[in-house]
Structures are given as C-alpha cells and as structure tokens.
Amino acid sequence: MTEILQERTMDVSVRDIAERAKSASRLARTLPTSIKNKVLLSSASLIEDRVEVLRAENRKDLEPGKQNGLSTAMLDRLTLSDKAIKSMTDGLREIAEQQDPVGEIAREWTRPNGLKIAQMQVPLGVIAIIFESRPNVTIDAAALCFKAGNATILRGGSEAYHSNRALASLFREACDGCGVDPNVVQALETTDRSAVGELLRLNDLIDVVIPRGGRSLIERVVEESRIPVIKHYDGVCHVYVDREADLAMAEEVAFNAKVQRPGVCNAMETLLVHEQVAGAFLPTTVKRLQEAGVEIRATDRVRAVLDDGTQIQDATEEDWSTEYLDLILSVDVVPSLEAGIDHIEKYGSHHTDTIVTSSEENAKRFQREVDSATVLVNASTRFSDGQQFGLGAEIGISTDKLHARGPMGLADLVCKKYVVTGNGQIRE
C-alpha cells in the first residue's frame, strides 16, 4: 500500500509541474523580446554575483562523485570551473543579442484568388530536457528555450543535483525579478528515477522531450516516451587524414580533437589515415598522443608504419563503434578516400566528422558523402558546438533528421504555423 501511495504522489507531483509549465507557456509565447532579454541579462548577473554560492553547491556534487568513482571525464563535465561559469554567462548575453525567432515570417506568397499565405515561426510549447552530468545544461537549455518562447522542465542527473537546483533557482529568480512567471523554467527536484517515467507519459502537457546523456539514457527515453523525442546519440567522431593533407595541420587538428577535452561528444574517437601518408604522419603523431596520455588501439596496418617498440593495443571490432569519452583512440590506415568514407558510414554515429586535405575536390566529396550532422574540412571536430557556431549555446547536438539536426540553437526551438489572410474568399 505504501508503494502505491508513493507512486501516486510522484504522479501528482510531476503532473503538477507539467501543468504549471503548460500554463506558463501561454505567457512565454507572447513575451516581448525586450523582457526576454532582460531576464537573460539578469540571469548572467546573478550567476556572477553568486559564484561562491554556486561553487559551494557544486562541491556537494563533486565530493560524492569522487567517492563514488566517477571517471575523470565525468568529473570534468560536472565541475563548475571558472571557464564553465564564464561560458554560461557569455552564452546568456549572446542569446540576448540574437534575433528573436518567434513571430518571424519564414516565407509568404499570394494565391491567384487573393489569399495571402505565410508561415510564421512559433514556439514548440513545453519542452522537457533530461540530461546527465553537465550543470551548465541547466542554464543553456533554460535560456534557449525561454528566448524561443517555450516553457521548460529540467531533469538533471542525480550526480549534479545540487548544482542544477542552484542554477535553475537563479534563472527563476531572474524571471520573478522581471515580472515573468518563474514556472517558465522548472527543475524536477528529485533523484527518483521514476520521475522520468512519469514525465514521459505526459503527452497531453509536454510537446517535446530532448535527452542529453549516454546511450542508455537516450534509449530509455525513446522506449518509454509517449512524447516526440529529439535524440542525441553517441558521438563516434572521426578525423580522416587525406593523402593530400598538410601533415603539420593534420597533427594539430587530430591532437586537438582528441586531447583538448576528451570527455565530450564532439571529441575524436577514431583517426583514419590514407596509406600514402601514414608512414610520414603516424609515428610522430602517435608519439605525441601517447605522451599526452592517450591509449592507442589500432590495426596491424598502423603497427607496420610505427617505430619499433611503440606500445599499442589491438583494436577490436567493438572499438570502431565505441564512444570512449576518455583518452583512448582507435586508429586505422585506409587505402583511399572512399574507404575512409565507407568506414565512417559503417561505424560512425552520424554526429561529427572531419577531413584534413588540401584538395578542394576531396573536401567537397567528403562533405557531400559523409552523412553526419556536422562535416568539417581542415578543422577540429571540437568545433561542432552551438557556442562555437555562434548560436550562443545549444540545447544539444541532434543526430536525428526530423525537425533539427546538429547543434540546436534558437532556430531549432520553434516550429511553423500557417497564417492566412483573405478578404471574403469562399471555396467553390
């Protein structure tokens, strides 16, 4: 009986939050741009004023995380460092400067009968964001959804409970201070996993669910949700070094893509090198990567061009499709650009891939044929990021093909409706 009562209480609590969000979304879609920007700028100032409070709350998450054996990469994502805090406040201010997409006319035309047809951009409505580890997602998601006229329900992972709650509270405080219903942003303040299941059943109140985290989280959301889901699956990202590459450039790109921040979805997990440049490129590059602490898993084709005594592990079939999120790298030598593209198609996750080449023809072919959300030429995979693309921040990096794909900014948090103007036309 107790379990039944607890389940019922959870259902009522989550539904109550969703109902408040639905009500707040009606206000959110009509807010003037000036008020939305005022909230965003106020949020940035509050974060800067409360840095020490935020760090204290963050420590409440970091210490248990260390004790529970969270990986270095996970702890990095969990930490509210100076850089992470600045990124949040910079993002808030950049979003405030961006054009408000709500109400924009995407296209318009006039029919022979005089009817004026137009497509207007409108908010999605209520968006539920379910995410792991990164507390900065609380602010990025709240800010982007709010500027795009949506209400947001945030459910972060238990490992970042205190940090997420503190940041959501600051955003709500900014809303309240600007005369905006703070329920446009709400956090599920529970670590109970059943809350996610309850949330995913509320298709009468929530319009879209966006999960950010590991494959197990996303698969659970997709399996259980009655609500449309915009997915962000694994980031099995590749760097392909073409036979016509500038090898010094290729080394810098590959090193940055793997080492600069290995625990994120746009870090390189597989390095592919054309066989004609493998002998000149791999020995020095592998040595540099290993000196940075990278474990190399590779094929006999790679081993054949390395210096004797270079320590590498044999790559398994599973390695090619693994998102390590750590200082581990799969490496192979391929006979052609086509073979490189085939490898990416077979093992990649359609997230982010790059080619290093001086051949315009090969660059264009790579960008045309690689079926990923972001395809780069002569640049690190680490640039596949909303802030780096000038979006202010991102709600996630979608690997879907419907509605949104790649880093999702303001333009991806609205949909369209037809608005039609006549002067008495009737259909015959």
Image (spheres, rainbow, N blue to C red):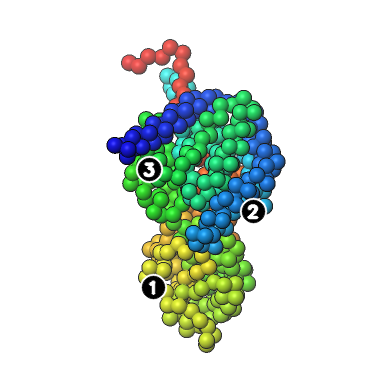
Which residue is the extreme one toward the bottom?
Answer: 308
Circles 3 and 2 in contact, beta carbons < 8 Å: no
Between label 3 and label 2, give the one nearer the viewer: 3
Residue 411, compared with residue 333, is above or below; it is above
Camera-nearest residue between 43 and 230: 43
Residue located 47% across and 84% down the image? 304
| Residue 32 coordinates in the image, percent (x, y) | 60, 26
Circles 1 and 2 in contact, beta carbons < 8 Å: no
Camera-nearest residue between 20 and 386: 20
Picture disc at residue 194: 3
Picture disc at residue 81: 2
| Residue 69 coordinates in the image, percent (x, y) | 49, 62
Question: What type is the residue that disc 3 sits on?
Answer: Ser
Q: Is residue 40 left or right of residue 210?
A: right
Q: Is residue 105 visible?
A: no
Question: What type is the residue that disc 1 sits on?
Answer: Thr
